Image: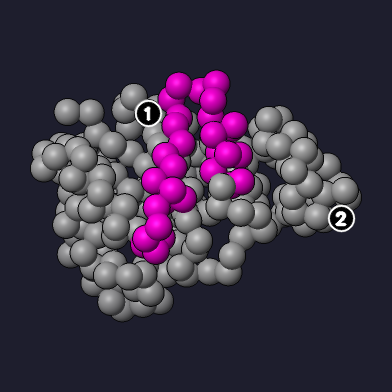
Amino acid sequence: MQPLVFMGGTFDPVHNGHLRTALELKQWLGVDQVCLIPSGAPVHRDEPGCTPRQRLEMVQQAVQDEPALCADPREIESDAPSYSLLTLQALRRERGADCPIIMTMGMDAYQTLPRWHRWESFLDYAHILVLARPGYEGAEADQQLLNFTRTHQASEVGELLSQPAGRVHIQELTPLGISATQIRQLIAQGQSPRYLLPEPVWHYIQQHKLYGYH
């Protein structure tokens, strides 16, 4: 059964760093597709710089010509709180008991996991694939997370592809040095963010006058 691999995030806005990472994941794991799931109103951070619907539409614009990537609107179209656990439960119901589901996140997000709603239940429904910058130090500040990682860590990524759920794998990956914060700041300052994000996304920002564009 084809594994389901997805990346969540606010994507505020989606940029080439997100997209290149997703495409490299697709190629590295040998799966057909990687899904981007923009979060609804964020539970863990302040409201982003535009509406959830606009963030979703920018992701849809970004992936429309790339069959290896897709946009999943479920969190933004849901009336429920944007909890990852609810998304994982829904994906498991849809995919059945045997499909490998791989939730991908960066190391920064992973280190905040103990603050997430019922985070220790995530592995009941999916694997967690953590993308770390090369040379990262493995000593998480949170002892609870360190124990969680040690208990569930997979020695190789193949374990995530052959089992439905239950494992954590940390993979070093060199990301493009692009941040959504940097893009928002450039736009607010009247500078161009071109080549940091897909052209259709930049056109969308201009059309809807987002992030202080004028």
Q: Is residue 74 magenta?
A: yes
- Depth check: give the residue in front, 65 or 140: 65
Magenta span includes 155: no
User: Taking 120 as reference, is 21 above or below it?
Assistant: above
Q: Which residue is mark 1?
A: 33
190 to the left or right of 137? right
Quadrant for residue 61, please give it.
top right
Q: Could you tell me the amino acid type at mark 1? A: Gln
Residue 134 at x, y percent in the picture = 48, 50
Q: Say left or right for 59 vs 202.
A: left
At 31% from the left and 28% from the top, the residue drawn is 31
Kind of residue at disc 2: Gln
Give whichever of discs 2 and 1 has the lower sequence position.
Answer: 1
Tell me the crowding category of disc 1: few under 14, some 14 to 19, or many 20 or more residues within 10 angstroms, Cα based: many
Q: Which residue is mark 2?
A: 189
Q: Position of residue 133 (x, y in %)?
A: 49, 52
Tell me the CA gap for discs 2 and 1.
36 Å
Residue 207 horizontal side relative to residue 114, left or right? right
Disc assigned to residue 119: none
Residue 174, image x, y percentages: 52, 44
Specify the segment rendered in magenta: 54-83
Disc 2 residue crowd, few under 14, some 14–19, many 20+, Cα 10 Å? few
Front residue of 61/186: it is 61
* 181 versus 111 height, above or below: above
